[in-house]
Amino acid sequence: ADPETFIKLLSSVGSVESVWEWLLTEWFRHFDSMANTERQKLSCVALTRLLELPSPITTLVLHKLQDYITMWTSVVMEMQDGRDDGGDNLIWQETESHDYESPEDVRMRLQSAGDLVHTVHTLQFINARLQQLIVATGGEEAFQRDWLLNVDRDVLQEFQHAFAGKAAGVIGS
């Protein structure tokens, strides 16, 4: 879905700033309660897509940067749990049909094959959007000085530790 369409929908409810603040506060408050890793990844991708939006949304997103970094750390660690190849646990290999496959099995197999939860590499997706955000805020130095400064040091250290060597150049150590 297009993030701009989502913002238009929000503005139909009230001022974007107040609806945005409420929505993100609630979304992040309940994020850790999601037991389903597919829903966590989908929510992470959706929230991360909002980084693509221009100002004033960029500023609203940046005010929640600590929540974003906490979410990214959690989801990427979950997607790479038990792996040492940098892969994503929810990207499945394409499965072939078999003789005993029902029409429902075919439908489910084809639907999963096209689902972004099973086709998008979480770390690479976050890394690309974060790089764009850093450029939009004036570069790495300005990003660190103006925005990263507001993120709790422990949250940042956990992010840097979890992403060591995986998201080089995104958020300096």
Image (cartoon, rainbow, N blue to C red):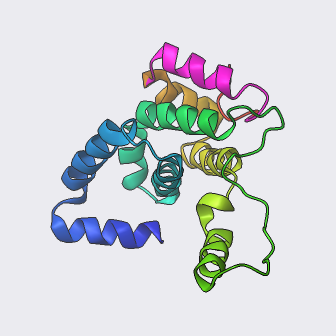
- The residue located at (21%, 55%) in the rendering is 19
- The residue located at (50%, 20%) in the rendering is 155
Q: Nearer the viewer, residue 85 or 142?
A: 85
In the orientation shown, which residue stands out farthest toward the front? Answer: 100
Q: Position of residue 138 (x, y in %)?
A: 58, 42
- Tell me where residue 127 sits by quadrant: top right
Indicate yes or no whether the magenta region holds residue 100: no
Q: Position of residue 116 (x, y in %)?
A: 61, 64
Marks counted in the figure total 0
Q: Position of residue 156 (x, y in %)?
A: 55, 21
Q: Nearer the viewer, residue 122 or 67?
A: 122
Position of 120 compared to 72: left or right? right
Position of 33 compared to 149: left or right? left
Q: Nearer the viewer, residue 41 or 13?
A: 41
In the orientation shown, which residue stands out farthest toward the left? Answer: 14
- The residue located at (53%, 25%) in the rendering is 145
Relative vertical location of residue 75 with respect to residue 103 in this rendering, above or below: above
- The residue located at (66%, 25%) in the rendering is 162
Position of 51 compared to 164: left or right? left
Indicate yes or no whether the magenta region holds residue 163: yes
Q: Position of residue 12 (x, y in %)?
A: 20, 71
Q: Quadrant of the C terminus?
A: top right
The magenta segment: 151-167
In the orientation shown, which residue stands out farthest toward the bottom? Answer: 103
